Amino acid sequence: MTRVLHRHLHRKPPVAAGGEGLFVIGADGRRYLDACGGAAVSCLGHGHPDVLAAMHEQIDRLAYAHTSFFTTEVAETLADELVRNAPAGTSHAYFVSGGSEAVEAALKMARQYFVEIGEPRRAHFIARRQSYHGNTLGALAVGGNAWRRREFAPLLIDVTHVSPCYPYRDIGEGESPEAYGRRLADELDRAIVAAGPGRVIAFVAETVGGATAGVLTPVPGYFRAVREVCDRHGALLILDEVMCGMGRTGTLHACEQEGVVPDLITIAKGLGGGYQPIGAVLAQKRIVEAMSRGSGYFQHGHTYLGHPVACAAALAVQRVIARDGLLARVRASGEAFGGLLRRRLGEHPHVGDIRGRGLFWGVELVRDRPSRAPFDPAIQLHARVKREAMARGLMTYPMGGTIDGARGDHIVLAPPFIAGEDSLREMVERLAPAIDAAIASV
Ligand SMILES: Cc1ncc(COP(=O)(O)O)c(C=O)c1O
């Protein structure tokens, strides 16, 4: 019997009682090797002593102060450090408690910006199919995952969804990646025109598509073309790096590798590494200045904005990443991890695609490799893989609906940045039989 309203009402998950490095430890003593950081969260693994010490110190000093009364030294320092390392032109960080809150804040900040500068007719967002931006109503509306949206569709604001950047399935025969990227940017251009002149607030996209699409890395030039289209129409570019940001792909911000600077970046998961719930919006100076010159405030707020213990945890996580050179390590071990996955699973008859960057990888499963036909969604292959992996003491992050919200299965892998090559190999060695057992069970 449980009084917790769990994610699934007919299944109670195992009890997690401890955490140690790359392992989550069950109440029964079982050790689960964490190959996904939960949902690409635990970038420093579990129980990192430096982060725990920073949190203890902050709790002893001050656990909470409402931001309508006070700021705190720790929030100011975290903002200074994030802004210093953010793309050029970033001037401020707005701290919230997670990814969905970061996306909601970014949507509202973008809208307020246009109200402040005298363009209130801009009231429309464009985003991508198969994207995930969170589960609150605004974030769900911009998200493009059909399965998550369906039940709540009557409650969602009207958003235009354009194609994701999904070369494995959508690149044309003989089309170069660059031409494919330009084709997608042209589609965005047409969507902005169709919404009407001066109507679009922003295009919202995950720099590297994560949870619902199984790690879609953008083709070269795609985001530069997107940035150009947004600029031409006076629309903002909001990049959602809640999952792919804060070092996950080998640079602090994934957009650094695309050569673009968005107007707003949302970050969360790896920001606090799971030690505390925290997210943020990193805003360009012109956005903040428009609010400063206009209303003088951002018309938003939550009770736990800039929570001191969350800021202390995030500051410690980010300092460990910098001190220990973990971005370079993510790049190197990411290469190795990709190689291990390709060697072990590259020829697997039911692995259609292996894609990723840094320590952020997706494995797309197919019933038939030549036709890329997916498995019947009714068999819930992704859930079987997750179960079989857990039975082998391995945490992975599989999901269904990869192709269109209904069809397709993928597994997201997002190991902690501290994972050594032996552990990465062990993850792959446990994953392969879990996939085989899942397929054998259908
Ligand atoms: C890209 C992206 N945006 C937003 C969210 C929502 O974050 P949260 O679950 O912390 O609200 C997620 C969560 O997976 C995400 O991957």
Image (cartoon, rainbow, N blue to C red):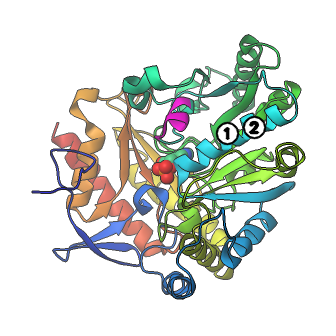
Q: Is residue 203 above or below residue 334?
A: above
The C terminus is located in which quarter? top left
| Mark 2 neighbour class, 10 Å CA radius: few under 14, some 14 to 19, many 20 or more | many
User: Can I make out residue 224 in this image?
Assistant: no
**Secondary element at image label 2:** helix
Q: Is residue 141 left or right of residue 106?
A: left
Q: How far is mark 2 from mark 1, CA to CA?
A: 6 Å
Give the residue at the far right of this rendering: 293
Q: Which range of residues does the magenta coloring cover?
A: 135-141
Q: Which residue is mark 2?
A: 112
Which quadrant of the structure image shows residue 216?
top right
Q: Is residue 230 left or right of residue 274?
A: right
Query: Residue at position x 59%, y 52% from top?
Result: 244
Q: Which residue is mark 1?
A: 108
Q: Is residue 75 above or below residue 239?
A: below
Q: Amino acid at mark 2?
A: Gln
Is the CB of mark 2 within 8 Å of ligand 1? no
The N terminus is located in which quarter? bottom left
Dominant secondary structure (helix, strand or loop) of the stretch shown in magenta: helix
Was residue 138 drawn as part of the magenta stretch in this picture? yes
Query: Residue at position x 17%, y 56% from top?
Result: 3
